[in-house]
Amino acid sequence: MHMEKIKALIVKYKEILLYLVFGGLTTCVSWGSYALFVLVGLPVTPANALSWICAVLFAFVTNKLFVFESRSWALASTLREAGEFFGARILTGLLTLAGVPFLIRIGLDQRIFGVEGMLAKVTMSVIEVLLNYVASKLVIFRKK
């Protein structure tokens, strides 16, 4: 009986669980590609930009196929989804860029593991993940 409850929870929250799993893998792609680009001699800024592109491309494909199960690869549909996906990631990224210093200015500057302002960074990351999920579910990969 206990396994049945666990299975039911997994089925019920499958989409969210997959979103979190692939989000973790996206982070690995970002960090791994960044390290690779730096190790082959790219300066930090282009390495960081290219690693962001790699991570967003990975996230797009995994979210499209496995999380939100959007199976159409018709050119118009895929271009719309990709444009909206990248657009949403750019907007939430900009929000985080502005949000972290704002939260620090209003007092959310506590240290985590000795890192100043880390509570603001973690808070904005949670907001960013939630906004990206909502945008993906309700706009980008919405069911017709």
Image (spheres, rainbow, N blue to C red):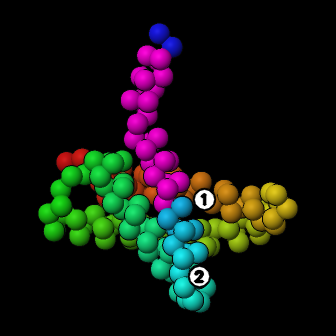
Is residue 113 highlighted in magenta?
no
- Residue 125 circle label: 1
Where residue 11 sits in the image (x, y, percent)?
38, 29
Magenta span: 3-27
Q: Is residue 131 visible?
A: no
Percent from the top left, x then y, of residue 104? 76, 67
Secondary element at tag 2:
helix
Residue drawn at 47 percent across, 41 percent down: 17
The residue tagged 2 is 39
Determine crowd level at label 2: few under 14, some 14-19, many 20+ residues with C-alpha closer than 10 A: few
Question: What is the magenta segment's predominant secondary structure?
Answer: helix
View extreme (right): residue: 114
19 in magenta? yes
Q: In this view, does 100 lie to the left or right of 45?
A: right
Query: Residue 109: x percent and y percent?
Result: 80, 63
Mark 1 neighbour class, 10 Å CA radius: few under 14, some 14 to 19, many 20 or more:
some
Q: x, y percentage for residue 89?
A: 45, 67
Dot 1 or dot 2: first in sequence order is: 2
Residue displayed at 43% across by 16% down: 4
Instruction: Tell whether 14 sits left or right of 29.
Output: left
